[in-house]
Amino acid sequence: MGTVQIALSEKSIQKVVKKAIDNFHVTKSGASNGRFRASYNLGVKLHGGTVDLQNNPDEIKISELDVVYDPLNVKLEIDIPEMCVGGFCIIQSPFGGCWLRAPKICIFSANPDISIPINLDGLIESEISGGFKPEIKFFDNPANAGMNEYQAHANNVADKWQLFLKVNWLDFDLIDISDTVGNILDKIIDNFIDGIFGGLPGWAKSILSWILHGISDIIRGILDIVDDIDEWFSDLLGVSFGIFDFILTEVANYFLKKTPLYQLPTPYPIMPGNPPVLLAIKQLGVDIDATEMILNIEV
């Protein structure tokens, strides 16, 4: 048994990791139920970041990786209990009953009564940083079942040693929620309130204005919006929807299960020919220092 070493520079590792980052894309959607309902449609990509080799412990460190939300659409729906005015008797009948009644007007009869769509594309800034250690896996390719090693090589379905990355640590940092988010929500609520009374007679407007005094605060109360709208949106996205944990989980699974950085077929062709000379790789190991990654190939 012998060992062959292949040294990969930090620059070459950076290129491979960057390519994997650029190919990352996940989607998710979900909704909640109740008097206040919220739904979302999410797409996530990754961009930028810096990649460095560390040797204490051996790991690949990815820093300040931008999370790109494309798209991030949120819809807030509120069901307000129905309110009615009018319907009272204007002229009583001397024989009982009523000869003339005021019109009865009801609002908030729909379900939901308020629907607030918000497009958050480009309005939320967040980053991911993490440390990853090499994880070697052997892929027993089912496509070569019944083939000998030469047939598997000729059909490009040989077994493979694969180098993945396993998370040592992973952090999510919510950098900023743009003030535009709060402005959008305020404008939608204000427009809704202004439009509630459209087309109603003057007497109904006067009564409803009194009943609905402070409805903006009522809506915010239903939404549980405190003074800090950034904190409210962060809680909605991160806790209620679980979006931030979802992103971290998907990043970890992407590098550990879906995207090998390197693959070595085994047996490995060391000399072309008909048939070629194939060399079986018995094991693959990895060492990292500050300047390079070394592949230890046992044959």
Image (cartoon, rainbow, N blue to C red):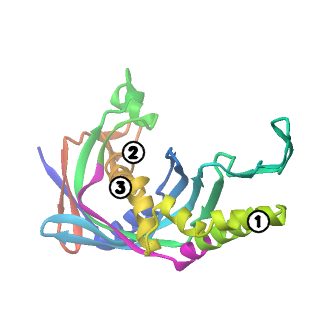
Disc on res. 132: none
Specify the quadrant that holds the N terminus. top left
| Callout 3 amino acid | Asp
Question: Magenta segment, which residues?
Answer: 163-184
> Is 96 rendered above or below residue 115?
above
| Callout 1 amino acid | Lys
Position of 238 with respect to 288 (left or right) is: right
Q: Residue at x 84, y 62 (%)?
A: 201
Q: Earlier in the sequence, mark 1 or mark 2?
A: 1
**Picture coordinates of residue 41, whole percent (x, y):** 56, 53
Q: Are marks 1 and 2 in contact (CB under 8 Å)?
A: no
Q: Residue at x 34, y 52 (%)?
A: 249
- Mark in the foreground, 3 or 2: 3
Q: How many neighbours does mark 3 have within 10 angstroms: few (below 14), some (14-19), or many (20 or more)?
A: some
Mark pair 1, 3: CA separation: 47 Å
Q: Residue at x 57, y 56 (%)?
A: 76
Position of 44 with respect to 159 (left or right) is: right
Q: Looking at this view, is 88 or 127 the one in front? A: 88
Q: Earlier in the sequence, mark 3 or mark 2?
A: 3
Residue identifier under label 3: 245
**Picture coordinates of residue 35, whole percent (x, y):** 53, 48
| Callout 2 amino acid | Pro
Inspect the magenta stretch and tell me whether residue 166 lies in it.
Answer: yes
Residue identifier under label 2: 272
Residue identifier under label 1: 205
Is most of the magenta stretch helix, strand or loop? strand
